[in-house]
């Protein structure tokens, strides 16, 4: 008895219709205009900040689109301000320590949530993320009272602990998404060869998750660097203030002068490093924010 084998014919690729191509061509100018408007809306505030930072004297109140006599005087005043340099060092120290601790604790927690067999992992992750919904203003006063009683008020340690509390949920969420995308077979092979779960985590998972760890570090550092409410509530002297608070406390050469130009110059100096970091690592940042959107 003969058997007839039918070979399936390949399905030709679907060619867009003329109407479909026309619709997409019509949408391109609209999309381009929308992108340009969004880009201008993002760049205008930064341009105005630079514009103001280059003005002095009467130019500050003129409201012109560009400085008539550009001057670097405001930048020189900021650099010569000892309180600003101290605050800059405090911000770097607080940001680095908080980011390092967040990566240490978040990597362990994210590994457990992504790789280990735990019950109600989704509920645990939801509870972790719920911390980010707490309004900072609601807990700033209680923390101020507690810190004043135990001696952590107006100290860098008193800033690192609450900032770490709010940085951990985001770090755990991003790292959990990255750990889930690593094939389980690699870890299983290590366990079969005699490695412990911690050894598999340290020698297999962590090296493969370096892009995700770098993304998390950038996001956490930027968040800690820009945080203002806790920093202004839990500090009272220039010795412990961070950059956002130090800029808010800038004063003019006399009590009747508003230091708009100096504040603008300081804001530019503080923003430029973050802007460079974001531009360099923008692909990693987007990957970190969208990781696990399809898988998981």
Image: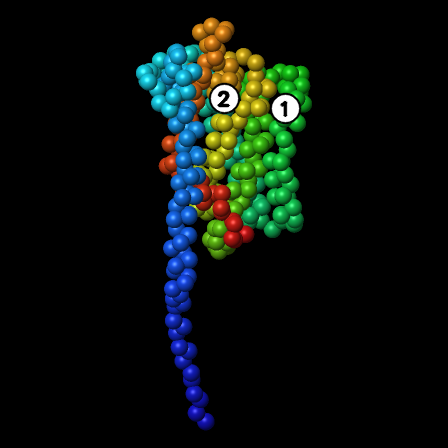
Label 2 Cα neighbours within 10 Å, binned few <14 / some 14-19 / many ≥20 = many
Number of marks present in the image shown:
2
Residue extending furthest toward the bottom: 1
Name the residue nearer the viewer: 285 or 24: 24
> Which residue does the image show at 48% across and 38% down from the upper left?
216
- Which mark identifies residue 244? 2
Task: Establish if 179 lies above or below 5.
Answer: above
For label 1, the SS is helix
Question: In screen coordinates, is 49 left or right of 70?
Answer: right
Residue depicted at x 38% and y 64%: 18
Q: Are marks 2 and 1 in contact (CB under 8 Å)?
A: no
Mark 2, secondary structure of its residue? helix
Q: Is residue 199 among what the camera can see? A: no
Pick the quarter of the image with the N terminus: bottom left
Q: Earlier in the sequence, mark 2 or mark 1?
A: 1
Q: Position of residue 99 (x, y in %)?
A: 49, 31
Q: From this viewpoint, is residue 45 visible?
A: yes
Give residue 10's quadrant in the image.
bottom left
The answer to whether 197 is drawn above or below residue 4 in the figure is above
Query: What residue is at 55 percent from the left and 33 percent from the top?
Result: 167
Q: Residue visible at 51% across and 14% down?
A: 249
| Quarter-of-image position of residue 73 | top left
Give how far across and how far down residue 236 sits, in percent: 57, 14
Q: Which mark is residue 5?
A: none
292 relative to 54 in the view: left or right: right
Q: Which residue is mark 1?
A: 140
Gap in angstroms between the C-alphas marked 2 and 1? 17 Å
Q: How is the image coloured?
A: rainbow
Q: Nearer the viewer, residue 194 or 38?
A: 38
Q: Closest to the observer: 221 or 103?
A: 221
In this picture, is 248 found above or below 42?
A: above
Instruction: Residue 100 in the image: state x and y as whole percent.
Output: 49, 31
């Amino acid at each position: 008895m003969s058997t007839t084998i039918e070979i399936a014919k390949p399905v030709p690729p679907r060619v867009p219709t003329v109407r479909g191509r026309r619709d997409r061509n019509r949408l391109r100018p609209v999309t381009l205009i929308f992108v340009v408007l969004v880009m201008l809306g993002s760049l205008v505030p930064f341009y105005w900040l630079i514009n103001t930072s280059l003005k002095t004297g009467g130019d500050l109140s003129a409201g012109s689109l560009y400085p008539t006599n550009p001057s670097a005087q405001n930048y020189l005043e900021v650099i010569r301000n000892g309180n600003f340099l101290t605050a800059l060092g405090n911000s770097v120290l607080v940001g680095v320590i908080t980011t390092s601790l967040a990566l240490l604790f978040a990597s362990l927690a994210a590994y457990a949530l992504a790789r280990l067999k735990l019950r109600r992992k989704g509920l645990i992750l939801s509870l972790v993320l719920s911390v980010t919904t707490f309004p900072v203003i609601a807990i700033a006063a209680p923390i101020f009272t507690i810190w004043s009683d135990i001696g952590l008020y107006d100290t860098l340690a008193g800033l690192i602990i609450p900032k770490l509390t709010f940085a951990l949920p985001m770090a755990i969420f991003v790292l959990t998404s990255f750990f889930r995308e690593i094939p389980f077979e690699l870890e299983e092979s290590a366990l079969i060869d005699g490695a412990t779960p911690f050894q598999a985590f340290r020698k297999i998972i962590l090296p493969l998750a370096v892009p995700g760890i770098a993304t998390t570090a950038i996001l956490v550092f930027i968040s800690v660097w820009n945080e203002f409410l806790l920093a202004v509530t839990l500090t009272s002297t220039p010795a412990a203030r961070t950059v956002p608070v130090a800029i808010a406390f800038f004063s003019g050469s006399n009590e009747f002068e508003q230091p708009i130009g100096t504040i603008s110059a300081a804001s530019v100096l503080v923003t430029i490093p973050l802007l460079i970091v974001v531009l360099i690592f923008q692909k990693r940042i987007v990957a970190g924010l969208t990781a696990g959107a399809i898988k998981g």
